[in-house]
Amino acid sequence: MIGPHLTPERPLSPAAHSLVSMEDTRLLTRLQRGERAAFEDLWQRWRGAVWSVCVAMCAERSDAVALLQAVYGSLPRSVPGWAAPTPLCCHLGAHVFRVVHAQLELSPVVGIDVPTAGAVRVPDAATARDVLLRVEPHVRLVYLIDLFFHCPAPTLAQLLELDANDLRHARGMAAWRVIEGGAQ
Amino acid sequence: MTLDRATVDALLPCFLCGDLPDEVHAAIESALAEDAELRGRLETLEGGRDACLEALSSLAGAVPELDHELDLSGLLSAAGGPAASGTEEAELEDFEEAPTTVMSAIDIPARSTQLTAANDAPAATTPYGVEVPKAESFTPPPPSRPLGPAAASVHPGGLALGLAAAVALLAVLAGGPPQQPAEVQLLDTHQQVVQEPAGFIATTDGRALMAALRAAGADPRLAMAPDLTDWGYTLVGGSVSGRGVVLVYERDGQRYTCQIYSARVTSSRPDVVQDASGVVVRGFQEGELGVVSWTAGGRTCLFSGPAPVAELMAFVTDRIERSRGAREG
């Protein structure tokens, strides 16, 4: 069941990720003009995703709230660097990644093992949650950003100045762990 | 393009995300059309993702209301036009005038010291262990970027994925060299530049140095020459390093470098971490060299020299805080 915080199913075609909607373009223009209503619109659309990431990254709820505030509060300073050809979801995903990574002082996303998996099975929600929360935080963050913001690895890598393969490896590692957990 | 089964399997999470190169995506589609087991694993990955979404949604619950209004003053004042970057008065921390298209000039709010990541196991630290002998005999070890061995075991599913699959995976994705400069390379740079190698621009004039660095090919956003005389550091000169810059200062007859890059520094350390007005400052001691690094507004700076790291940390944090206090005042 898709809940209110969840973003719609994304297409599998790589070409689809290269398109930026007119709605995104207009919203970005308004954001960069400093329109308060534009920030409210952006936040209304994405706050659920941001909150889900914060909760999944923090041991304490109060820390998750602090993270949420940090992401929100630093938006105005981040927005000037958002270039139009890149979708807003990618800019926001990169922004969340930077703030969370810095605030929690996570390890660099480098040298992630290429994931392997044996027996796999779709886990129930509780098992998926438990397994995911045991994944290393810097790897988990990459997976969460992908889960909620759907930014292609090469785009996110460019925004974060990371290696796209490291992001892919982290994402794959977490994905395999989740379904290996379902088989145990 | 044809991919072996092990590589297709390893790439299934990426196929699900839809961000593989077109020819790789097509090759996997072909493989999936012929292999029911692989299709099953893809569906399981999809189911796992949906399970995570469902689980995290119910875990999060309602989004809390935030009680702070956004400060849009910076955006509104900048709406009149882009500000120049790399000006003569540019401070190391003064990043917000130059909008970037790669890394945003963000000001990370003051970090709560209570924040801890859930299950934040300490990262496996593998100090580079670089011995920093006298400059004339320094031979840096080759920078390493370990892949990490993939688990080379045969699973009940009959697949054996090992280092060969890892290499194949990377070859397929045509991964390039890591973009972040490694710690050991930066220490090597320090040792080289303090000796004023070929291409070094010797001048005590900060404005002239900035212009010369830009002319020599440095990224204009990085071509800065901060005035550190209040702390006893006198500018000696600088040189270009890739698209970044290396500045050399002198204090009490000793030379210090300030390296400025657009990419983050990979580091398995630090020994010391401090918060300076929301900027995380890291430091470690490498032999006689104290090394301090910080990232803000799309720039990573590394200050190093023959001094205790605590001393350099105190200088850097004082400068950051003083600069931010002057800006907010």
Image (cartoon, rainbow, N blue to C red):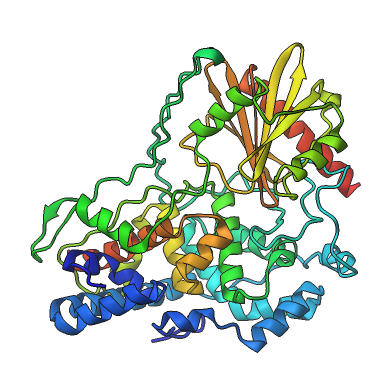
Q: In this picture, is B311 found above or below B17? A: above
Q: Residue at x 43, y 75 (%)?
A: B58
Q: Nearer the viewer, residue A67 or A120?
A: A120
Residue B313 x, y percent position in the rendering: 67, 28
Is residue B323 shown left or right of residue A125?
Answer: right
Q: Nearer the viewer, residue A76 or B141?
A: B141
Residue B280 appearing in the image: no
Q: Nearer the viewer, residue B231 or A49?
A: B231
Q: In this picture, is B318 found above or below B223? A: above
Find residue B56 and report its image quarter. bottom left
Q: Nearer the viewer, residue B175 or A10?
A: B175
Residue B69 x, y percent position in the rendering: 78, 68
Q: How many marks?
A: 0
Q: What is the quadrant of the N terminus of chain A in the image? A: bottom left
Residue B32 appearing in the image: yes
Is residue B198 shown left or right of residue B167?
Answer: right
Q: Residue at x 32, y 66 (%)?
A: A175
Q: What is the quadrant of the C terminus of chain A in the image? A: bottom left
Q: In this picture, is B115 found above or below B230? A: below
Residue B93 x, y percent position in the rendering: 76, 44
Is residue A164 shown left or right of residue B134?
Answer: left
Residue B159 x, y percent position in the rendering: 12, 62
Q: Residue at x 77, y 81 (%)?
A: A37
